Image: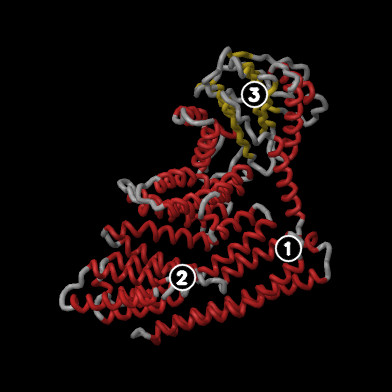
Amino acid sequence: MRHCLYIGMLLLLLSACARHHSGRTDMALIDSLTSVVYSMMDDQPEQAMALVDSLEREGIYSSVMANCRRAQIASEQYEPSKSEAYALRALNDKRLKDEKTEITYFIYNLLINSASNVGNTEQALKYATEAVRIAHSDSSRASKLYLPDFLTSIGSCQFKLNRNHEGNENYERAWLGNEELLKNAKSFTWFYPAFMLAVSAINDNAATDSLDVAMRWLPRLQNIYQRTITAEDIPDHVKDNCTAEMEMTLARLYVLLGQRREAEQHYKAFLATNFAKCSAGQKYSASYLEKTGRWAELAQCVDLSEAYYVENHSQYTHEYLNTVLARKFKAQMQLHQHEAALNTAASLIAMLDTVQELENRDDAAKLAVVYETQEKEQKIAQQEADLTKQRLIAIIVAFALTVVFLVMYVVFRRQAARRLALVSAQKERIESELRIAREIQMSMVPNDFPQLDGLDLYAQMTPAREVGGDLYDYIIQDGYLFFCVGDVSGKGVPSSLFMAQTLRLFRAFAKRRYAPAEIATRINDELTDHNENGMFVTMFIGKINLRTGSLEFCNCGHNPPLLSGQVMEVKPNVPIGLWENFVFEGEERENVKGCRLFVYTDGLNEAENPFQEQFGEDRLTSALRSHPEGTSRQLIEYLFAQVALFRQGAEPNDDLTMLCLNIL
């Protein structure tokens, strides 16, 4: 029935074309015909191709436009080589100069996508670079519209080629171009490319361990996300997709930052979207589950994500082998399902020939299209050279995969119990132990904060190395909130052990409801005993009556905290652990209700950029004054982002800890 409907529409439209053929074709009619072509691209590609041929014969479509549509149809059918050939015919058509300028840029978009889809990153980069060169020499509005997209493509290609610095430079240029375009924009169609640019920049930098650069993009992502989803014309499904992209990007980023609790919160928010429930969403989930080592869930998710490749007719591709079968194999290995893993490996090897055969067919189709052009001999020679190179690469990859899986098959058949121990180098073991030590250390400080009326408390710690010496803690005891922030001298494992001992003592004495000065004195008595290494810890210890808001505190050689954005005048005392029998002096504030108390370690004010400039107390107080509203958590996340921006990619030179509380 649907096929008959399209045939009827085709007859009516071509009849209309005949009536208009003697004069200039009505643009509304062309738009209607193009809509019919679009509606047939996905599930009726042959009819769509036939319609394009008819429109070209009738003179409704120019040869340039006809080849553009053919390239789109081939792309929809996941025939990237064929799509590239049609797009090249359009680009090399002498009549292209008679078309609108944006048609040229549209063709380059098709070429970039086609080259990217076959994994030819160098060719995609070449196309994008040519497009940028043309756009720079063109003063039309179309060049300004397309230029950020081409720069984004260049940045993405450069990351794939491990040219990360150049990739970030082009991402920055693309962002500046988008900012200029978005000054008076209202439609989501303007915001969405900038949103996806920020997503790509964060994901690419996070994947290459450039976490500071990724964090520098985070405020941009949050801002453009809000502008995109609040656009009046945004469809519900696009809004849902944006939310899914946003939450998954943050989930991946926080995993790499070692903040598993925040990562899991964003992953749960991703799962709440409609996009997460579709096959493409399952593909996203699989990447997150692999990063977090949740192998049982990954095995289930990979089975569901397989539908994505079936829907897109791309189950016989190298991408399918890598993202579905390879992940399934890895999950089964981690779950010790060795027989199932071997079966998966056998399936992967068996599919390599099929994948190669289909790619050869696609290449043959591309040659057939190229053959139709006037310069067929030259183009065929070039294409054959490219195909020979691609086939050689594919054969090498197939051979390598076959050898790897056959070797693993033999190894597991012999049940070599020590296979993992022999593969693991001593450095990897040490790094693994340090990661475990960091997880243990992070588990020692509270990650859950009280949900009490009248109390807003949040803290966060990020070690500069795998393990560090910063600390924070809190205890609520009989209507009193005891809290502390500290910084142990030195870094690494010794500092982390000293930090653990300090936390244990603080909790023990706080539970006895001692005053902060008494807690400091007693901790000092314990830590100075047998302290041959001369280690010490600066601390700020506080005790708040949650009913009256009165604050008792003792500052032990620590940075003075800020109260309502102003640096508190405190008695410095000395760091804990230096002098035996030292008696610490405490202080009081009668009522701090409604006053935000902010305590931090020197990893904040002494954070350095590549020019060795420090963040400093002036920037800190200015940042606090510019962010007077919001929760404690929002303030701390804002300051982390500001420090990341200030560092400009420089490595952290010290642990960074912040605690903020407000008695309402």
| Looking at the image, residue 176 lies above or below residue 317 | above
Count up the numbered dots.
3
Tell me which residue sits at (73%, 54%) in the image: 428
- The secondary element bearing badge 2 is classed as helix
Residue assigned mark 3: 540
Tell me which residue sits at (73%, 74%) in the image: 406
Mark 1 neighbour class, 10 Å CA radius: few under 14, some 14 to 19, many 20 or more: some
Residue 660: x and y in percent read 57, 28
Please report whichever mark, 3 or 1, sits nearer to the chain's N-terminal start: 1
Q: Are marks 1 and 2 in contact (CB under 8 Å)?
A: no
Quarter of the rendering occupied by the C terminus: top right
Residue 26 location, quadrant: bottom left
The colour scheme applied to this rendered structure is secondary structure
Whether residue 177 appears in this view of the structure is no
Mark seen at residue 520: none
Residue 154: x and y in percent read 44, 61
Tell me which residue sits at (59%, 31%) in the image: 458
Mark seen at residue 333: 1
What amino acid type is highlighted by mark number 2?
Answer: Ala
Left-right relation of 460 to 619 = right
User: Which residue sits furthest front?
Assistant: 1
Please report whichever mark, 1 or 2, sits nearer to the chain's N-terminal start: 2
Mark 3 neighbour class, 10 Å CA radius: few under 14, some 14 to 19, many 20 or more: many
Left-right relation of 307 to 586 = left
What amino acid type is highlighted by mark number 3?
Answer: Phe
Tell me which residue sits at (60%, 78%) in the image: 395
The answer to which of 89 and 294 lies nearer the viewer is 294
